[in-house]
Amino acid sequence: MIETLKLDQADDEENPDVAIVLPTYCEAENIENLISTIESLETDLVIVVVDDSSPDGTGNIVKKLQEKYTNIALLTRPYKSGLGTAITDCFRFILSQPNVPDYIITMDADYSHNPMDIPKLLQSAKRGHHVVVGSRYCKGGRIKGWTLTRLALSKIANKMTAKLVALPIHDFTSGFRCYSREYIRRVLPNLHSHTYEIEIETLRQAGIHGAKVTETPITFTNRKKGKSKLTVNEVFNFMLYVLKAMVRKSAHS
C-alpha cells in the first residue's frame, strides 16, 4: 500500500505550471539540497517524491521539508519496487489531484540532473512538444564522471533503442524529461514497466500516438554522494526488454 501525503493546494484556483517527480531510495545525502535548489527556481511548481522506505531516512528529511514548503507531496512505498512503478505511481497521483499541473518533469534525485535545466525543458515543452528529453548526446550535451565501460554500455543501449523507436532524438535512455499533462493522460494506461524500461516505454508510446518529441542538451554529472542504484541485473533486464521488443517489431513488420 502507498501512503500518500497530499499537497496543500486547496486554495489554489489555477493549476501549477509543472510537477517535478523525484523517485528516491537512500538519497539522504542529496535530497534536501536538491529540493532547496528546485524551490529556488522562479517557477510555479509542485514536487512529488516517491520513496521506497529508504533505510537512511530520506523520507523523514522530505517530511521535515514539508513543514517549510507546502508544495511537496511524499508517496512512501513499503519496499524498493522499481523505477518504472515509481514513475507511474507518481503520474497517477498527480493526475488525481484537483489542480493538475500542465507539465510533468521526471529527474534523478542524486544531482546527476542539474535542476537549473528545468526551465529549459519547460520552455521547449511550451513550444508545443509533448515530450522533451534532456539529452546527453545531442549537440551541446555532455557527460561528466563516467567510466569508459558505462559510457559504452549507454551508447550501445541507445543505438539498440534507436532501431526500435523511430524518433528524431539522440538520447533514448535519459531520465530527465518533460511531459505534457495531455500526453501522460493518453499513454498512462499503456505503461507497464517495473524498472528502467520505463524510459523506452514512454518513448515507444510517443511514436505510436504520433506525439511531438524533441530534445534539449544537458550536462549529466555522475553522482558525487551516495551509491548508484543501477544493478547489473537491471542493466541485463533493460537490454533484454529492448531485444524482445525488437524481435516483436520485426515479427509484425
Image (cartoon, rainbow, N blue to C red):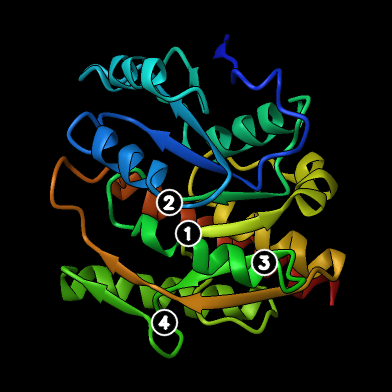
Q: Answer above or below: position of 81 versus 38.
A: above
> Helix or strand or loop: what does disc 4 sit on?
loop
Say which residue label 4 marks: 137
> Helix or strand or loop: what does disc 1 sit on?
helix
Residue 202: image x %, image y %? 67, 56
The span from disc 4 to disc 3 (Cα, nearest Å) is 19 Å
Q: Residue at x 35, y 45 (%)?
A: 233
**Which residue is nearer to you in this view: 151 or 108?**
108
**Contact, CB < 8 Å: mark 2 with mark 1?**
yes
The span from disc 4 to disc 2 (Cα, nearest Å) is 26 Å
Tell me the amino acid under the disc marked 2: Leu
Q: Residues within 10 Å of mark 1 (few under 14, many from 20)?
A: many
Q: Nearer the viewer, mark 2 or mark 1?
A: 2
Tell me the amino acid under the disc marked 1: Ile
Q: Is residue 243 visible?
A: no
The span from disc 3 to disc 2 (Cα, nearest Å) is 17 Å
Tell me the amino acid under the disc marked 3: Ala
